[in-house]
Image: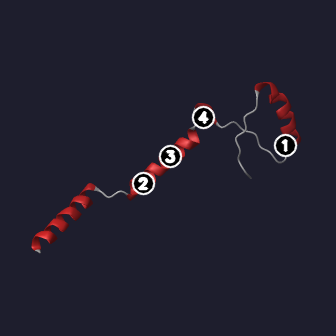
Amino acid sequence: MKTLTIQVKDDFMTEFMKFIDTAKDNVIVQKDKNLELDPYFYERKKDLQKILDDDKQMITDDKLWGNVHKHLEKIQSN
């Protein structure tokens, strides 16, 4: 099953729902509360997930400074 977002003009809603009723065995109509509250909900969710994924790949301060100190020690010993 696929999920789509459909915008229907107010004055066409009754006819649209009659059409959907003819396909009721193949179509499920439900309101998405997330989109009612925030029309950009799914775009924001996707962006936030990318930020979280990028954050997981970042190096910690301790590891970064540990690498810097190791590098400086290596340079100084040469």
- Tell me the amino acid under the disc marked 2: Asp
Q: Secondary structure at mark 3?
A: helix
**Could you tell me residue 62's position as x and y percent?**
24, 58
**What residue is shown with label 2?**
54
**What residue is shown with label 1?**
24
Side of 53 where 69 appears, left or right: left
**Could you tell me residue 19's position as x and y percent?**
87, 37
Q: Closer to the N terminus: mark 4 or mark 1?
A: 1
Q: In this view, which residue lies farthest toward the bottom?
A: 78
For discs 4 and 1, the disc positioned in front in the rendered view: 4
Identify the image quadrant of residue 12. top right
Q: Label 3 vs label 2: CA separation?
A: 11 Å
Q: Secondary structure at mark 4?
A: loop
Q: Label 1 vs label 2: CA separation?
A: 42 Å
Q: Secondary structure at mark 2?
A: helix
Q: Label 2 vs label 4: CA separation?
A: 25 Å
Q: Is residue 46 above or below residue 34?
A: below
Do the residues bearing badges 3 and 4 touch, measured as CB atoms within 8 Å?
no
Q: Label 1 vs label 3: CA separation?
A: 34 Å
Q: Quadrant of the C terminus?
A: bottom left
